[in-house]
Amino acid sequence: MVLARDGREVRQGKGGGGGKRPVAAVAVPPYANRTIIMVCVLAFVLRLPPESFAFVPAYFFGTVELAGPLPTAALWRGLFGHVLIHGDLTHLTSNIAVLWLLGDVVEREAGHLRFLLLFLAGTVAAALTEGLLAADRMAPLIGASGAICALMGAFLWMHPRFGLLSRRVPRRLVQGVIVIFALLNAAMTLVPPPAGSPLAEVGWGAHAGGLSAGLLLGALLCLAGPRRPATIG
């Protein structure tokens, strides 16, 4: 295997004269990420009820008045389904924009299955971390930002082979923004904003859980190596 001039991996195949010719790697179409995006948009358009899909920490961890975890469908539906629900158009479009940018890159590098495992792990880690840190465990958690933060954490380890972010300057710029966001998030998690502040409505704990899961799993993905690229002859 050799590197093409644009940095993509290529394999060498045998030419007609017995020599070797390069066989270019082909980027994996990000089917899983685009499907997640479409489902989130569809859930918003259909106005799925937040109370049916939100993650309520009290259902898992319990409260003084409520035992937990409750073995109900609502618990598991909320644990995974909260990523589909967004409070308003700004919430949806901001999450979708980041998911479109980073999700496509991570899926192309990791492959469909590992991308989905990373997204789901970030979903669960975000919900559980938010539940552990929440001052009010009856406050519902909605939105895909925790799972997206897992993609951010994984991206910090990556050296994409395809697209704009395969170039050093754009990649470093995006990774720098992620590091700044992670530091801001850590500050907000350690010193929560006052009640009543708009910042108090942000799931900082969910972001922290997603970022942590992404950093850990991203490191494991790097150790496992990139997905085996498809080839064209």
Image (spheres, helix red, strand yellow):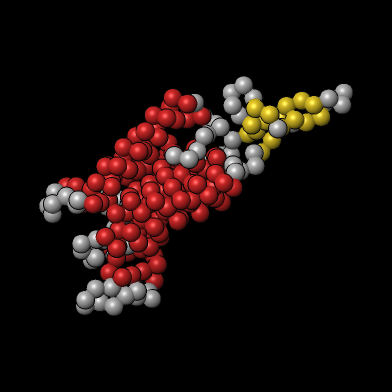
Q: Which residue is more in the foreground, 200 or 144?
A: 200
**Residue farthest to the top, as pictured:** 5
Residue 35 appearing in the image: no
The front one of 53 and 218 is: 218
What residue is rendered at 41% in x and 42% in y?
152
Q: Residue at x 47, y 26 (%)?
A: 168
Q: For the point 64% across and 31% down, which residue is it?
A: 9
Name the foreground residue: 213 vs 55: 213
Quarter holding the C terminus is top right
Determine the residue positioned at 43% across, 27% down: 170
162 to 95, vertically: above or below: above
Quarter assignment of residue 24: top right
Q: Is residue 11 left or right of residue 224?
A: right
* Residue 114 pos. (x, y %): 54, 50
Q: Picture coordinates of residue 70 (x, y %)?
A: 34, 75
6 left or right of 141 in image: right
Q: Is residue 229 left or right of residue 147?
A: right
Image quarter where the N terminus lies is top right
- The percent position of residue 194, horizontal first and vertical second, equals 13, 52
Q: Position of residue 179 (x, y in %)?
A: 35, 38
